[in-house]
Amino acid sequence: MNNSADVVNSGVDWINNNQGLIIEYGLNIAAAIATLVIGMIIAGMISKTFHRILTKRELDPTIVEFVSHMVKYVIVAFVVIAALGRIGVQTTSFIAILGAAGLAVGLALQGSLSNFASGVLIVILRPFKSGEYIEAAGISGSVESVQIFATTLVTPDNKFVVVPNSAILGGNIINYSRKPTRRIDLVIGVSYQADLAKTKAVLESVVKANSLVLKDPGVTVAVAELADSSVNFVVRPWVNGGDYWPVRFELMEAIKNALDEAGIEIPFPQMDVHVDK
């Protein structure tokens, strides 16, 4: 019991003798917390302000998102350093230590740094914009946003996909929306017994009957290949980018019906089985 009383008395004496120090550190900690909280709020407000200003200037949404996020994170970094300074941490030494630690972390997180650098290049080079339909890193979808480390896509079946920026920039990027028009490439096979001139006329009439097919440039209908079991025609009309899939589906159905009505056979793989008795 005496030992416990001595410890309590020692603690009380220490508090009495260091009240000024305790108050000073308490105020510094409170100020650091206040700096951190207020700084976070200000960082969010400034980020939103940048977002609003850049949006009013009608910049690409991908650039708006990227810049607003970057501004927020830079301000947060300064706020954290300022908060550490309030509690007595030597910020100059801390920055040096942070730099050394950053180098070590950077070596360990090369993938993340690569994603960051790729994000910057995507924003600068602008191979795609928000809302465009692209194919990159084996994923096809509409671009929703370009963030610091990843790009978000929405697939045609409404899946939300997050793709690392380095994976996108490290491969081929196919942008289906950048040009206003697209060419539909169809390969139609007919029998070797078919009248080629008649077949070509039927295919041309089907394509010209579709109101969504563009008149300029013209449609290409030609024999492309003498295959093993069919004569293959290529049918290449041009359409507006947004009409690509509807026109493609309509043409496939219309071509099949028109060839059937004209008595032109569309060959398909067949197998003859001989049974020995």
Image (cartoon, helix red, strand yellow):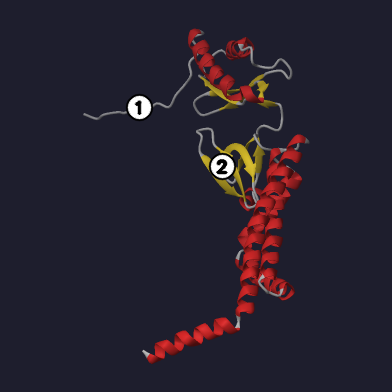
The percent coordinates of residue 226 (x first, y second) are 57, 26
Q: Quadrant of the C terminus?
A: top left
**In x, y percent, where is residue 155?**
54, 36
Q: Residues within 10 Å of mark 1 (few under 14, many from 20)?
A: few
**Vertical side of 31 occupied by 219: above or below:** above
Residue 244 spot, x, y in % from top left: 61, 24
Specify the label residue 139 is tagged with.
2
Q: Quadrant of residue 270?
A: top left
Task: Compare residues 12 and 51 and report the one nearer the observer.
Answer: 12
Answer few, some or many: residues within 10 Å of disc 2's Cα (few below 14, many 20 plus, some between 14 and 19). Answer: some
Label annotation for residue 136: none
**Please, what is the three-letter code of the amino acid marked with disc 2?**
Ile
Question: Is 177 displayed left or right of 262 in the figure?
Answer: right
Q: Are marks 1 and 2 in contact (CB under 8 Å)?
A: no
Q: Secondary structure at mark 2?
A: strand
Q: Is residue 266 above or below residue 120?
A: above
Image quadrant where one finds the N terminus: bottom left
Compared to residue 43, the image places residue 268 above or below, namely above
Q: Residue at coordinates 57% horizontally, 82% vertically from top-left?
A: 16
Disc assigned to residue 272? 1
| Nearer to me, 206 or 138 | 138
Quarter assignment of residue 206: top right
Kindly give the residue lying farthest to the right in the view shown.
Answer: 57
Q: Can residue 64 be seen from the camera position used here?
A: yes
